[in-house]
Amino acid sequence: MSGRYLSELLLQKGYEVHGLIRRSSTVNTARLDKVVDKVQLHFGDIVDSTSLFSIISRVQPDEVYNLAAQSHVKVSFEMPIHTTDSTGVGVLRLLEAIRAAGLERTTRVCLAYVVASFAVRPLSRRFQASSSEMFGSSDAELQNEGTPFKPCSPYGISKLYSHFTMQTYRSAYNMFCVSGILFNHESPRRGTNFVSRKITMGIARILKGELNCLELGNLDARRDWGHSRDYVKSMWLMLQQDVPRDFVVATGKQFSVRDFCQLAFAMAGLPIEWKGQGLEEVGVCGDRVLVRVTTEHFRPTEVNALRGDASKISAELDWHPEVTFLELVFEMLQSDMRHAGLIPPSTSECNTRIATLVEGMHDILIA
């Protein structure tokens, strides 16, 4: 998802961009669509040291953005070894490949996960996308760079392993390694198995008559939701520092899955009312049940609330989120409706529909 936004940003800045793509029976570059012809793709895998060394030696990158991972939290419980191998140990393989290629003093690395992107430009640096899931069951109302980590999933644990690996190689080998601790960053390119996209795509299918009811898990899970387009800018800024430092990247605002769901349905002209409690709760529009809660979508351990404090990166790198929560939901809904062959609502239509939400919800959204 973020790989294309990052590629677009780097291409705009005049970079020569190389990307890592796994071999499969069919080549899937759909998420890169409009930039695929401008990016030089190399077959490889974050779990294969040989391919990483071969590609890095050949490309000689100046900046490395690591976005590769198994990033679905629930799936990490079902595939914990694969998640650890790709999300955690994969970073170790990448850093060792850079060292083996003799680029540890010239390549900058940024940890950020989705696709490994190698950018050719003077001075090699590394970026790694760490995750707010490392905070897990944090007791802090706001999480910042000094908040203790308490991961609650194999994914969160793997991210923490890679985060500390980056810090260790920075200290031990004087490598330019930085990690962005990224809170939820969404976009119309989000995978369909993630809740934000599941909601907007589900609404489009309901409007088209292909789906009767959307099934979700924990409606009360609260997250700090930002846009991937904003977050890739923070990745680039981190690799332009004189001294490598890690930063939290977040909007500082928090909304629940219930908020996201209710807002998106209202924008689509299907205002829902919540009835029942717990597993019996449903979202109703008129006489239609459009949302149900099911245990299938709950995680073995739930992270109830996360909200980031991005004051450090705002003050030191002048990074600020530009896309609001409202704009994010609207953009995702419009995109999925268009893909379904539907005419999406206009901005004025959405504003009118949002105004009909219950007062408490409306106050939260326009704050």
Image (tube, helix red, strand yellow):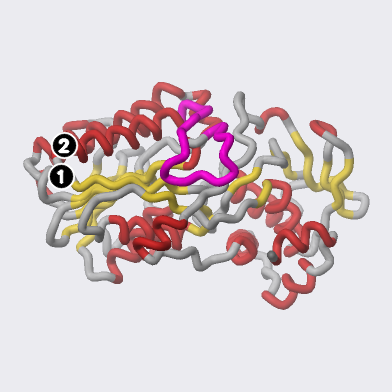
Q: Quadrant of residue 203?
A: bottom right
Tell me the SS state at disc 1. Answer: helix
Asked whether 149 falls inside the magenta stretch, the response is yes
Q: Give how far across and how far down residue 367 sits, in percent.
A: 69, 64
Q: Residue at x 25, y 60 (%)?
A: 240
Type of amino acid at the residue the image marks with label 1: Ile
Specify start and end residues of the magenta stretch as a single range. Answer: 136-155
Residue topped by disc 1: 56
As drawn, the residue found furthest toward the left would be: 102
Type of amino acid at the residue the image marks with label 2: Ala
Observer-nearest residue: 321 or 208?
Answer: 321
Q: Earlier in the sequence, mark 1 or mark 2?
A: 1
Residue topped by disc 2: 97
How many residues crowd around disc 1 within 10 Å: few (fewer than 14), some, or many (20 or more)? many
Tell me the SS state at disc 2. Answer: helix
In this picture, is 328 found above or below 144?
A: below
